[in-house]
Image (cartoon, rainbow, N blue to C red):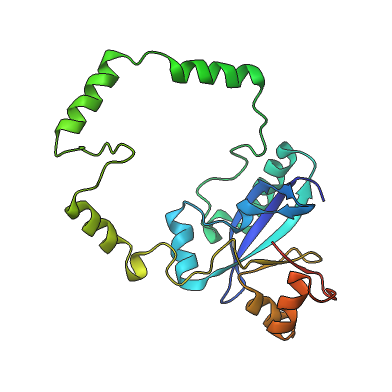
Amino acid sequence: MWRHYVYIHFKKTDGKPFYVGKGSNRLRDKKQYFERAIAPHKNQYWENVVNKHGFVAQIIMSCQTDKEAQFQEKELIKLIGRGNLTNLTDGGDGHCGITVSDELRKKRSLNARGKRNDNWINSIRIARKNGGNGGVVKKGDKLPDGWRNNLSKSKLGNKNPWFGKSSPVAKLVLNLETGIFYNSVNDAAIAHCINPKTLYQYLDGSRVNLTSLVRA
């Protein structure tokens, strides 16, 4: 399978597609990781659908280049129709797997170490005088009690971005034959009519894996 790929997110409740995207996998310990396909997306419409229906990610195709993945993403969005998707664009934007040259790295490093202009320095000083930190928190600063209480309340119950969701990293299972992801070992076991305990043993290597399922 090539590094670049195109994926679709389907509603877990009825199997309808609601998002098309592209990404590039990473090879670690001789296993491929499709992190872009399974990670939460910073898209309010996407979040609304996932909070209500859940999602299943499926790798639709692999591509030799990012340019090809962009083209295929646009074609899929056009085929399904923007009206049926939570995509904010027609696709084909962004780049996957860009390798930054040594020259560009050096230029960025020099810019980061360069002298800050007076306007930037004054704006930070003013911000820190307003209400303690004024929104600019330094490493090691202790947040005021009011801030901490508000932050705590903002993450309780369904206000927490992970409320009702499974971890996209710890328990994800991938079917290598179909490209379908499952949110947990239990979900994968149910879908394939396997005892969850047996599947756990397949995946942790304590028994010979007789399936095409692997930890993602």
- In this image, 181 relative to 205: left or right? left
Q: Residue furthest front?
A: 140
Residue name at image x 80 percent, y 41 percent: 64
Q: How many marks?
A: 0
Q: Nearer the viewer, residue 188 or 61?
A: 188
Residue 164: x and y, percent?
A: 45, 72
- In this image, 163 relative to 214: left or right? left
Residue name at image x 63 percent, y 41 percent: 92
Q: Nearer the viewer, residue 122 or 92?
A: 122
Residue 166 lies, with reference to residue 107, above or below; the image says below
Residue name at image x 78 percent, y 66 percent: 178
Residue 186 lies, with reference to residue 181, above or below; the image says below
Residue 183 lies, with reference to residue 193, above or below; the image says above
Residue 184 lies, with reference to residue 103, above or below; the image says below
Residue 13: x and y, percent?
A: 56, 77
Quarter of the figure with the C terminus: bottom right
Where on the picture, by quarter, is residue 211? bottom right
Residue name at image x 24 percent, y 55 percent: 148
Q: Nearer the viewer, residue 60 or 126?
A: 126
Residue 180: x and y, percent?
A: 71, 66
Residue 7: x and y, percent?
A: 67, 56
Where on the picture, by quarter, is residue 214? bottom right
Where on the picture, by quarter, is residue 190? bottom right
